[in-house]
Amino acid sequence: MGFHRLFKGLYLRQYLRHKPLLVRELSANRRLYHAKPSAKPSIASCLLLVIPGATFCLGCWQVYRRQWKLQLIDRLEQLVRQPAIDLPQHLAEVNGLEYQKVRLRGRFDHTMEMFISPRSLLKPEEDRS
């Protein structure tokens, strides 16, 4: 009987020695998974926070830009719909008349006419045939 006990004890020790690490942790901690403590967040976790934040900021910017654009279009439509006014005598007053219809009276000076031909890019090295 002594030999049988000795053989059984050796077999048990050998089994425990080659027991997988995960099983030993499970039996010791009684938890399937446990969080691995880390000193600093990884690059992937930082990107996972930055990308939604940047997307949210861009979305807010688009909403504000749309509101600004609609207000600008409304303002320009109001200016275009106003009746025509006489052009002021002083050029300093013209700055506030953007998109405003004006009425002019006078004579056209035909001596200063200039004919402009179609403008196209001509390179000297190209064949002009």
Image (tube, grey):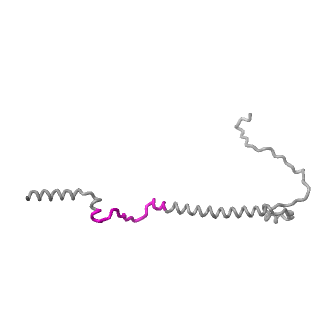
Residue 90 placement, left or right of 11 = right
- Residue 32 highlighted magenta (yes or no): yes
Q: Quadrant of the C terminus?
A: top right
- Identify which residue is drawn at 43% across, 61% down: 42
Among all residues in the image, which is located at the extreme top?
A: 129
Q: Name, please, the residue furthest toward the left.
A: 1
Residue 85 percent location from the top left of the image: 85, 63
Q: Quadrant of residue 84?
A: bottom right
Which residue is depicted at the point 39% across and 65% down? 39
Q: Nearer the viewer, residue 100 or 63?
A: 63
Left or right of residue 13, residue 36 in this image: right
> For residue 104, what is the image quadrant?
bottom right
Residue drawn at point x = 80 percent, y = 44 percent: 117
Please provide percent x and percent y for residue 126. 70, 37
User: Where residue 34 appears, x then y in whole percent?
Assistant: 35, 64
Membership of 34 in magenta stretch: yes
Q: For this rendering, which residue is in front, 87 or 66? A: 66
Compare residues 48 and 27 and report the one nearer the observer: 27
Image quarter hosting the N terminus: bottom left
Q: Quadrant of residue 44?
A: bottom left
Seen at 80% across and 62% down, the residue is 81
Span colored in magenta:
25-48
- How many numbered dots are placed on residues in this image? 0
